[in-house]
């Protein structure tokens, strides 16, 4: 199935289990060649398909789910949590990011500190995860869209990069396939 699937959730689930084996290794790698300034020595938790606003409101605030300014359906593909940082990883495989999604990502940086008073916007990091082919295509897009996408993330990484990091553990090619499916119909 992995050789024909184009399902982003499958690839994210696979990556979740790879990261879960050694979260601090992944955080250290994520820090390399970036200005994320994450402490790879602290305790990190990786999470998958995070319905943050819905669950935070229901469990932490002990309030029922009802209409609020926070989308109850907003789901982060992957998240890293520490005591004082949240890293949201938004992933794409077959397609790229669109302008509406980019607006949602930027909005998350503003909304999360409103819920968690001990955090500020600089404690929320946004990482884009997509095909290396898409990253190359970003250069040829309309300049305004390219700028919006690039500027919305603190770091953009590719499935190809991750496949190289996890190559010894990733014998089923899931991360390589995630990189290859961009643009397939």
Image (cartoon, rainbow, N blue to C red):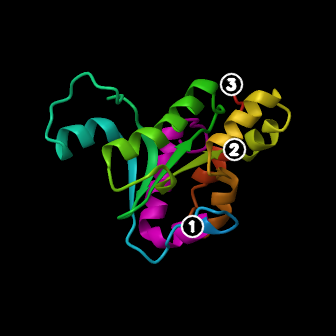
Q: Residues within 10 Å of mark 2 (few under 14, many from 20)?
A: many
Q: In the image, which disc is placed on residue 37?
A: 1
Of callouts 2 and 3, the N-terminal one: 2
Asked if residue 29 is among those painted magenta in the image, a careful observer would answer yes
Looking at the image, residue 47 sits to the left or right of residue 147; the answer is left
Q: Which residue is the extreme one toward the right?
A: 140
Name the element at disc 2: loop
Q: Residues within 10 Å of mark 3 (few under 14, many from 20)?
A: few
Residue 8 position within the rendered picture, expressed as x and y whole percent measured from the top left? 53, 38
Give the residue at x 52% y 48%.
Answer: 89
Quarter the C terminus occupies:
top right
Q: CA distance from mark 2 to mark 1?
A: 24 Å
Q: In the image, which disc is placed on residue 131?
A: 2
Asked if residue 22 is among those painted magenta in the image, a careful observer would answer yes
Residue 143 position within the rendered picture, expressed as x and y whole percent measured from the top left? 82, 30
The answer to whether one can see residue 49 in this image is no
Residue bearing mark 3: 185
The answer to whether one can see residue 178 in this image is yes
Q: Which residue is the extreme one toward the bottom?
A: 41
- Magenta region: which residues? 1-30
Look at discs 3 and 1 and give the one toward the viewer.
1
Q: CA distance from mark 2 to mark 3?
A: 15 Å
């Amino acid at each position: 199935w992995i050789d024909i699937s184009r399902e982003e959730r499958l690839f994210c689930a696979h990556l979740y289990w790879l990261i879960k084996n050694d979260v601090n290794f992944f955080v250290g790698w994520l820090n390399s060649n970036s200005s994320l300034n994450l402490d790879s020595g602290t305790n990190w938790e990786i999470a998958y398909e995070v319905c943050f606003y819905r669950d935070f409101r229901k469990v932490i605030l002990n309030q029922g789910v009802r209409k609020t300014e926070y989308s109850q359906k907003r789901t982060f593909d992957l998240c890293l949590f520490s005591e004082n940082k949240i890293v949201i990883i938004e992933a794409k495989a077959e397609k790229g990011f669109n302008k509406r999604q980019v607006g949602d990502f930027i909005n998350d940086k503003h909304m999360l500190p409103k819920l968690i008073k001990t955090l500020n916007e600089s404690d929320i990091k946004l990482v884009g995860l997509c095909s290396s082919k898409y990253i190359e295509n970003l250069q040829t897009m309309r300049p305004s869209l390219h700028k919006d996408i690039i500027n919305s993330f603190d770091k953009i990484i590719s499935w190809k990069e991750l496949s190289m990091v996890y190559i010894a553990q990733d014998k089923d090619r899931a991360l390589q396939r995630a990189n290859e499916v961009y643009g397939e119909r």
